Image (spheres, rainbow, N blue to C red):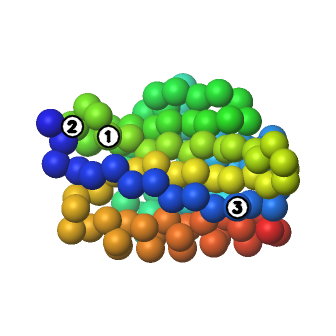
Amino acid sequence: MSDKVEFILEFVVKASPKMLYKFLSTPSGLSEWFADNVNSRGKKFVFIWDGSEETAVLVNKKTDKHIRFKWEEDEEADTFFEFKLETDDLTNDVSLIITDFADEDEIEEAQLLWESQVNSLLHAIGS
């Protein structure tokens, strides 16, 4: 059983799901806001921050809808991070829903980090 706790964040983004999905699923898009550099080979994505590397495996994706990654070094089978895109039928607002896991005493810090990252994403897409 996992010691990490799931948390979900939702952000309204002024962009089409098709355009936004490229920033969530491609190495060049992820390099714009999520990491300093991103390389991929098949389902393995290498994220580089300040010279350190973390590898994640692409677990599941549906074009323009969602993409789920699992950190390679994370032994806990039930943890992942996911970007999901939902469009409100009435307003056509697009929501970016991020699901991640963190130790209970690190959730607030993890949420602040995601908020900062998403602010970089919004800046990158001009939203």
Q: Nearer the viewer, mark 3 or mark 1?
A: 3
Query: Would residue 26 be found to the left or right of residue 13 on screen?
Result: left
Going by the numbered disc 3, the residue's amino acid type is Val
- Tag shown at residue 12: 3
Observer-nearest of 39 and 62: 62
- Tag shown at residue 69: none
Count of numbered circles on the image: 3
Q: Within 10 angstroms of label 1, few (less than 14), some, or many (20 or more) residues?
A: many
Going by the numbered disc 2, the residue's amino acid type is Glu
Up-down relation of residue 100 to residue 109 (above or below): above
Q: How far apart are labels 3 and 1 at the CA level?
A: 24 Å
Q: How far apart are labels 2 and 1 at the CA level?
A: 9 Å
Query: Would residue 4 be found to the left or right of residue 57 on screen?
Result: left
Mark 2 element type: loop
Q: Residue at x 46, y 38 (%)?
A: 69
Query: Would residue 124 be found to the left or right of residue 16 on screen?
Result: left
Q: Residue at x 60, y 43 (%)?
A: 84
Q: Nearer the viewer, mark 3 or mark 2?
A: 3
Question: Outermost residue toward the front?
Answer: 90
The x and y percentages for residue 71 are 35, 42
Report if the CB atoms under discs 2 and 1 are less than 8 Å apart. Answer: no
Q: How far apart are labels 3 and 2 at the CA level?
A: 32 Å
- Tag shown at residue 75: 2
- Tag shown at residue 79: 1
Quarter-of-image position of residue 85: top right
The C terminus lies in quadrant = bottom right
The answer to whether residue 29 shows anywhere in this view is no
Observer-nearest of 37 and 43: 43
Q: Residue at x 22, y 62 (%)?
A: 104
N-term mark: 3 or 1: 3
The N terminus lies in quadrant = top left
